[in-house]
C-alpha cells in the first residue's frame, strides 16, 4: 500500500474528503496535537504534545528524598480490563486527570507535574460514577479547584477540591 505524505502549510482539517483526495496542506485527522494559546505569533497553530511516560510514583518521602512506587496489586493494572474513557490536562498547573472505566470500578486518576506523583483521586466501587467505554467523557473542565465533566449520558458531575497533600496522612 502506498504511503501518503503531506506537508501541512495551511493547517486546515478536511473531514469531508476521502483520505486519498485531501489536498496537500490539509489533513484528515490529528492526534497528540494541541492548539497553541500564547501571546506570541504562533497563536492558533498546532504544536505536538509530549509523549506518554508511565510513572508509578505513589508518594514522596521527604526524609529519604525518595519516591515510593505503587504495588502491582494497587495500581491501575489491577483493575479488570481498565479503559481510559476521558482525560484532561489543566493548562494552569500542567496536571493531568484520567477517567478510567473497568468492570466494577470507576477511577479518576491524577498526575501532579510538580510532585511527579500519580494518585487515584476517586475510586468508585459502588457504581455512582458509572464510567463506560460506550460513553466517552469529552466535556471536561477545571475551574477554580473544581473538576467538572460529563459523558453526555448522565448529568454533569464535579469534584469540589482538587488539592492533594504531598504526603498522605497515613504515612
Image (spheres, rainbow, N blue to C red):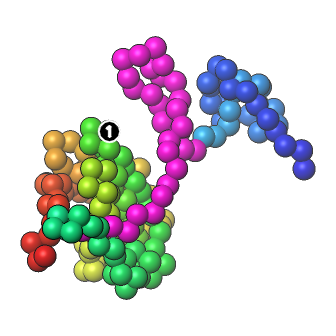
Provide the residue span drawn in magenta.
Answer: 31-60
Give the quarter of the image for residue 106. Answer: bottom left
Percent x, y for residue 94? Answer: 32, 44
Q: Residue at x 38, y 23 (%)?
A: 38
* The stretch drawn in magenta includes residue 59: yes
Residue 108 visible in the current orientation? no
Farthest right residue? 1
48 versus 56 height, above or below: above
Q: Residues within 10 Å of mark 1 (few under 14, many from 20)?
A: few
**Secondary element type, mark 1:** loop
Q: Residue at x 45, y 20 (%)?
A: 43
User: Majority secondary structure of the magenta segment?
Assistant: loop
Residue 132 visible in the current orientation? yes
* The stretch drawn in magenta includes residue 82: no
Left or right of 28 in this view: 50: left
Q: Residue at x 37, y 85 (%)?
A: 73
Q: Residue at x 26, y 75 (%)?
A: 124
Q: Nearer the viewer, residue 130 or 82?
A: 82
Q: Nearer the viewer, residue 16 or 81?
A: 81
24 versus 165 height, above or below: above
Residue labelled with disc 1: 91
Percent x, y for residue 90? Answer: 31, 44
Give the quarter of the image for residue 154. Answer: bottom left
Give the quarter of the image for residue 102. Answer: bottom left
Amino acid at each position: 500500500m502506498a504511503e501518503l505524505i503531506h506537508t501541512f502549510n495551511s493547517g486546515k482539517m478536511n473531514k469531508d474528503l476521502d483520505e486519498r483526495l485531501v489536498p496537500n496542506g490539509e489533513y484528515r485527522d490529528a492526534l497528540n496535537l494541541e492548539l497553541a494559546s500564547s501571546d506570541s505569533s504562533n497563536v492558533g497553530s498546532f504544536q505536538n504534545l509530549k509523549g506518554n511516560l508511565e510513572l508509578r510514583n505513589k508518594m514522596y518521602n521527604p526524609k529519604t528524598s525518595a519516591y515510593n512506587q505503587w504495588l502491582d496489586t494497587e495500581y491501575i493494572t489491577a483493575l479488570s480490563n481498565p479503559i481510559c474513557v476521558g482525560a484532561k490536562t489543566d493548562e494552569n498547573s500542567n496536571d493531568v486527570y484520567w477517567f478510567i472505566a473497568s468492570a466494577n470500578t470507576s477511577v479518576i486518576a491524577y498526575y501532579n507535574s510538580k510532585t511527579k506523583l500519580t494518585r487515584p483521586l476517586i475510586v468508585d466501587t459502588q457504581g455512582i460514577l458509572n464510567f463506560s467505554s460506550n460513553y466517552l467523557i469529552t466535556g471536561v473542565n477545571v475551574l477554580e479547584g473544581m473538576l467538572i465533566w460529563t459523558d453526555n449520558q448522565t448529568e454533569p458531575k464535579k469534584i469540589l477540591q482538587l488539592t492533594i497533600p504531598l504526603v498522605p496522612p497515613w504515612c
